[in-house]
Amino acid sequence: MTNLDRPAAAQTASTPRADQRLARKYRFDDPNMDLFFLAALGWGKSGGLDVGEVFEIVSHVTDGAADSWIRAFDQQAKLLDAQADEWAAKGWTRAAGEMRLKAFAAYRSAWQFAAPGETFNRLYGLHRAAFAAAVRELALPATFFEVPYAGKTLPGVFLQNLRANAPVVLALGGADTCFEDLFLSVGRSFFERGYSVAMVDLPGQGATANDGLHWEVEAERPIGAVIDVLINRFAAQSGRMALLGLSLGGYFVARAAGYESRLATVVASTPFPNPNHLFALSVRAAAAEAHQPASTATQRSRQHSLWKAGATSAAEFIAKTAGMAADPKRVTIPFLSILGGGDSPVFAEQAMRWHAEIPSIRKSLVLLNAATGADGHCQVNNRLRLVQEASGWMDDIFSQASQT
């Protein structure tokens, strides 16, 4: 989802905002920082920063102050990168790769609150280099690739599973993600469960806005281009592919589900068929709270949302995203909807309405409450539960397909 309108004040479960993503405070009063603090913790299981590292880093962060966040994560990333270099020189290749992946995770967290421009580009380049080095040092069967699209290219990586005839999962993030961090969120776990995994940045994701690519209404078009490459270059098979979308990716995959016949199933956490509605509410709330000083983290997040949408003002943002809507009546393929109980009431209403209205013969809605520890937006507080729900569903889909 977008960060266009995140206030500096903490959310409470009794007064949920339209764009709420967590039902409780974990550390920071600033809800943006709290969310990405939680994200940094969650990446640890897949090779990101460990708990002690994250808490040490954020002990140097001032609540809501974007530059303090950037400095703290950037400094730790440099230390980890240097340690990886030292171990690589000794021939400790595995340890170097593990440390390099941590450096990537720190660089990636660092740019979250950097405004589009010089600092963001510097940190993004460092995160990209660290991730590529980590993949190489860990000897992962990964191939970086580019998808020709609109005269530019969309970057991605493909993890080739050694299991014979392994189905392919195409994972897409949302407004705040890049294809590399999807490796830590879900990609590595799907790969370890026997899937080949593709992770790609669509227009407006990652740093593609630097190339003039922005969020698109007809998201099925770039997704179709990615699927073309998966089939033509990586021998993915029509009917042996699943599509997963997180956050704003829940809109992208909802659109593709209505147009793309080569998919066996689609999974969304959460389905987000009408982001235009939430965006309008967010802009309206921002205008009403204009008298309240916004944290620099909130200000930077708003700048990123405009940049990724190709807009220079809130009014232009609304105009450019006004057409973003997915038609549930077009969707007949198997569809799994996952919803965290602490997510925005707008997300919840859209997810439940989507599930009720799609005519798919095979569909399911999973609601994860606070007791699961996975009630946050896109299960940011328990990524493993997201992977378990999605992989169990996909396992059933593909096992039944092999029997017919």
Image: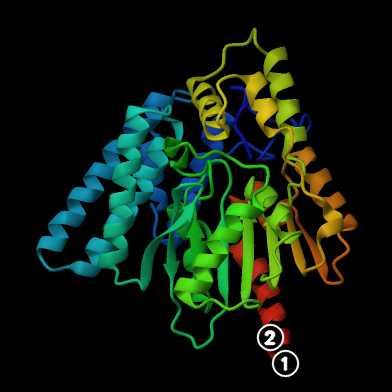
The circle on residue 301 is none
How packed mark 2 is, by other alpha carbons closer than 10 Å (few <14, some 14-19, many 20 or more), is: few
Q: Residue at x 83, y 54 (%)?
A: 328
The residue drawn where x is 34% and y is 35% is 121
Q: Quadrant of the C terminus?
A: bottom right
Vertically, is 4 above or below 104?
A: above
Q: On the image, which quarter does residue 363 sit in? A: bottom right
The residue lying toward the viewer, choosing from 339 and 368, is 339
**Marks 2,1: beta carbons within 8 A:** yes
Q: Residue at x 35, y 41 (%)?
A: 124
Residue 27 visible in image: no
Q: Is residue 315 above or below residue 356?
A: above
Residue where numbered disc 2 is placed: 399
The three-letter code of the residue at mark 1 reads Gln
Extreme residue in the front direction: 151
Q: Secondary structure at mark 2?
A: helix
Residue 376 in the image: x percent, y percent?
66, 47
Q: How is the image coloured?
A: rainbow
Residue 18 left/right relative to 200: right
Q: Residue 180: x percent and y percent?
A: 43, 54
- Residue under label 1, please give it: 403
Left or right: where 332 falls relative to 338: right
Relative to 329, 21 lies left or right:
left
Q: Is residue 123 visible?
A: yes
- What's the CA distance linking mark 2 and mark 1? 7 Å
Rendering coords of residue 150 (x, y %)? 51, 47
Q: Percent from the top left, x then y, of residue 149?
A: 50, 51
Residue at disc 1, secondary structure: helix
**Residue 35 sits in quarter:** top right
